[in-house]
Amino acid sequence: MSATFDDIIDADERIEPRDDMPDAYRRTLIRQIAQHAHSEIIGMQPEGSWITRAPSLKRKAILLAKVQDEAGHGLYLYGAAETLGVSRDELLDALHDGRQRYSSIFNYPTPTWADMGAIGWLVDGAAIVNQVPLCRCSYGPYARAMVRICKEESFHQRQGYELLYTLAHGTPAQKRMAQEAVDRWWWPSLMMFGPPDGESTHSAQSMAWKIKRHSNDELRQRFIDMAVPQAEILGLTLPDPDLRWNPGRGHYDHGEIDWSEFKRVLAGDGPMNAQRMAHRRRAHEDGAWVRAAASAYAAREEGA
Ligand code: 3HC
């Protein structure tokens, strides 16, 4: 007798597209994978706007490679979502009409070059902490997409850290620019991990189904514990006066996160929400002819 969905989950094995699965499992995976993909695509905007303004050819080439990687991550993830019986067009429609989300983190501005470093170190660093456990997600296509994405994310994080290190050990103006960028990105990076566990709608079920392997607060704490010593090596300070090592907990205690800001950004009222969505919709419209040409070509090849 073939294993049931619960047998496979209990055995810590993988659910594959053709396996029986509860509708709710399918729905929450479509929700999470789609929002992850949308985040990768929207996430190209903050950094893409600096490609033409990079301070050197080397930095331009690195940033170009990173932004191209993010596009690829989006395509892997849309591909993983499509194995659940939903089309990319449906997912993009859901993003464009606000029925699906993208990560709050990309609704913040990038006013200086140092923001490229802070995004790489903090945002991609947080993404790695969140995504490594997803390599063990119970849904096969998602877990496998994550393995390759995580390898590329480590380059993203390292290039950002090295960029900030260079600025922090440069002129006083460069160090100030780096510190101001870290001040802008620290708290929004902590919000990337989702609301506090007590307010998480999906965590309990997602953990029972082994989609989510750790809670939002656990991963947030893991990220904080990793970032504090790195900030010390950078010679930059993190904008939280309550950050201090708690030997009893074996973790860093930290200040209160402003969850009202998180809720405002999720409700569409962040600093850049309108710009990000207007840019996304315009890019989708401008790309309609490419999609039409690709479909016409595919139809002709099929008919040939
Ligand atoms: N931004 C936007 N929405 C968020 C959010 C965030 N940072 N954190 C939580 N939410 C939303 C959830 O989507 C959910 O709303 P919904 O029911 O409308 O979908 C609600 O807030 C409650 O949150 P939950 O904790 O119950 O939701 P999840 O169990 O889905 O946990 C998550 C949230 C931890 C973000 C989880 O979805 C996840 O791990 N997703 C995969 C990773 C991901 O999407 N990362 C996005 C970052 S972008 C990125 O990594 C790109 C890199 O190149 C920088």
Image (spheres, grey):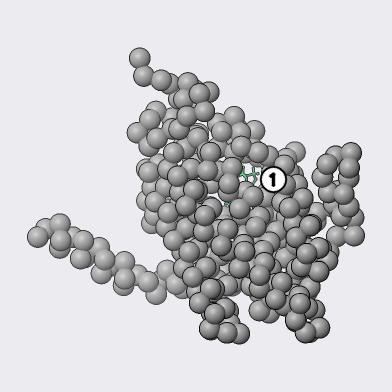
The C terminus appears in which quarter of the rendering?
bottom left
Q: Residue at x 85, y 39 (%)?
A: 249
- Secondary structure, mark 1, is helix
Q: Nearer the viewer, residue 79 or 281?
A: 79
- In this view, the residue in front, 3 or 300, is 3
Give the residue furthest to the left.
304
- Tell me which amino acid carries mark 1: Leu
Instruction: Characterize the local packing of mark 1: few (<14), some (14-19) or many (20 or more) Cα atoms within 10 angstroms.
Output: many
* Residue 114 x, y percent position in the rendering: 69, 76
Residue 134 x, y percent position in the rendering: 55, 43
Residue at image mark 1? 219
**Residue for point 77% across, 50% down:** 225
Residue 273 coordinates in the image, percent (x, y): 62, 67
* Vertical placement of residue 180 versus 56, above or below: above
Specify the quadrant of the image occupied by residue 49: bottom right
* 299 on left or right of 257: left
Residue shown at the point (42%, 69%) measured from the top left: 284
Can residue 119 be seen in this snapshot?
no
Relative to residue 3, is residue 266 depicted above or below? Answer: below
Label 1 CB-ligand 1 distance < 8 A: yes
Image location (x, y in percent) of residue 222? 72, 47
